[in-house]
Image (cartoon, helix red, strand yellow):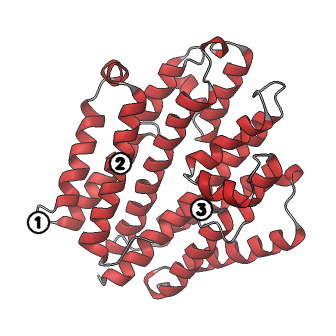
């Protein structure tokens, strides 16, 4: 298929997934803010979502202080912030409009309706009190888009590029979220094991829709190392790193056909590390180091996919 069409479909999926991930982070942070003494300060609670998005310098330059109102404005509604929900959904709609003929009519109607309702919600105002409902709406619309895609789109290369964009983006977000939690949200060993600690780890699981999955997998109290194992190595956990590469690798095998392209080699290498890796070895080498290395390699894979198939600079 034309690289231009593949590019639009790939980034359409990435932007919708990114908007959903941002909504998840904002929702779980808001819920944690309702827990007494959940953080030493409001800034300590609201800084991590901006850090996960990699936007600290831009945020501080424009807003200065970390609080609920400023982070909500920046990450949800600020059209000058390329990582905000409104920016991501706007770019998703533009990409969808460019390739309407390559999608089912239901897919286009879903993306267009999402954008129109978002503009209406913004006009009505989205305050801190309505944040959870807004985030739930973003997540629901993202789920609906994937469901419509799965139920109506021809299983051709266009479908594969959509799926590829979804899982590259999802793997990046899961790794960033887990890394920030381990190394920034609980800097003091004295916090470990307390009531607030339990609520924070529960919130992390809920942010990736994994609370019930954890209970089924471990039948145990919430423990940080088991959460890391679930989100890194468990192939049956839909948002884990392993599950993402269970999807990415066979997609690239079909796209590359018999040609041994570099992106397939990179994906296979990452998949093998997750498929055959052991959590004790990861912890021995350092979870932070493992996740930072994974993020770097996942980004390199995304750049290689861009260079190999899409013939366009990354969006």
| Local crowd size for mark 1, using a 10 Å CA cut-off: few (<14), some (14–19), many (≥20) | few
Q: Residue at x 84, y 25 (%)?
A: 36
Helix, strand or loop at mark 3: loop
Quadrant of the image containing the N terminus: bottom left
- Viewer can see residue 235: no
Q: Which residue is mark 2?
A: 296
Which label's residue is closer to the chain start, 2 or 1?
1
x, y percentage for residue 64?
74, 52
Residue 278, above or below 122: above
x, y percentage for residue 225?
48, 20
Quadrant of the image containing the C terminus: bottom left
Which label's residue is closer to the chain start, 3 or 1?
3
Q: Work out how far the residue at label 2 is from the one at label 3, CA to CA, in angstroms.
A: 19 Å
Q: Which residue is mark 3?
A: 83
Q: Which one is nearer the viewer's eye here, 220 or 27?
A: 27
Q: Work out how far the residue at label 3 is from the one at label 1, CA to CA, in angstroms.
A: 35 Å
Q: Are marks 2 and 1 in contact (CB under 8 Å)?
A: no
Helix, strand or loop at mark 1: loop
x, y percentage for residue 5?
38, 82
Helix, strand or loop at mark 2: helix
The label shown at residue 259 is 1
Tally the numbered discs.
3
142 sits to left or right of 113: left
Residue 26, above or below 32: below
Q: Which one is nearer the viewer's eye here, 111 or 42?
A: 42
The label shown at residue 68 is none
18 sits to left or right of 314: right
């Amino acid at each position: 298929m034309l690289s231009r069409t593949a590019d639009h479909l790939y980034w359409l999926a990435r932007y919708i997934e990114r908007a959903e991930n941002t909504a998840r982070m904002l929702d779980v942070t808001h819920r944690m803010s309702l827990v007494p003494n959940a953080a030493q300060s409001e800034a300590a609670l609201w800084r991590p979502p901006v850090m996960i998005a990699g936007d600290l310098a831009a945020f501080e330059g424009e807003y200065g202080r970390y609080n609920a109102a400023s982070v909500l404005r920046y990450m949800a509604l600020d059209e000058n912030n390329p990582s905000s929900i409104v920016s991501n959904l706007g770019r998703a709609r533009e990409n969808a409009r460019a390739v309407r003929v390559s999608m089912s009519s239901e897919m286009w109607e879903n993306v267009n309706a999402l954008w129109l309702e978002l503009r209406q919600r913004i006009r009505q105002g989205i305050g801190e009190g309505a944040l959870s409902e807004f985030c739930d709406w973003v997540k629901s619309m993202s789920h609906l888009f994937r469901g419509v895609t799965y139920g109506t789109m021809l299983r051709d290369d266009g479908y594969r590029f959509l799926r590829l964009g979804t899982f590259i983006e999802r793997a990046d977000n899961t790794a960033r979220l887990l890394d920030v939690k381990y190394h920034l949200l609980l800097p003091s060993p004295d916090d470990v094991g307390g009531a607030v600690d339990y609520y924070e780890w529960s919130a992390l699981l809920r942010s990736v829709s994994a609370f019930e999955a954890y209970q089924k997998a471990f039948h145990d109290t919430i423990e940080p190392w088991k959460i890391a194992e679930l989100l890194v190595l468990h192939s049956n956990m839909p948002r884990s790193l392993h599950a993402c590469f269970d999807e990415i690798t066979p997609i690239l095998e079909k796209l590359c056909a018999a040609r041994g392209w570099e992106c397939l080699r990179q994906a296979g290498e990452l998949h093998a590390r997750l498929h055959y890796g052991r959590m004790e070895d990861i912890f021995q080498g350092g979870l932070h180091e493992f996740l930072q290395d994974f993020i770097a390699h996942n980004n390199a894979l995304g750049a290689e996919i861009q260079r190999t198939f899409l013939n366009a600079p990354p969006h």
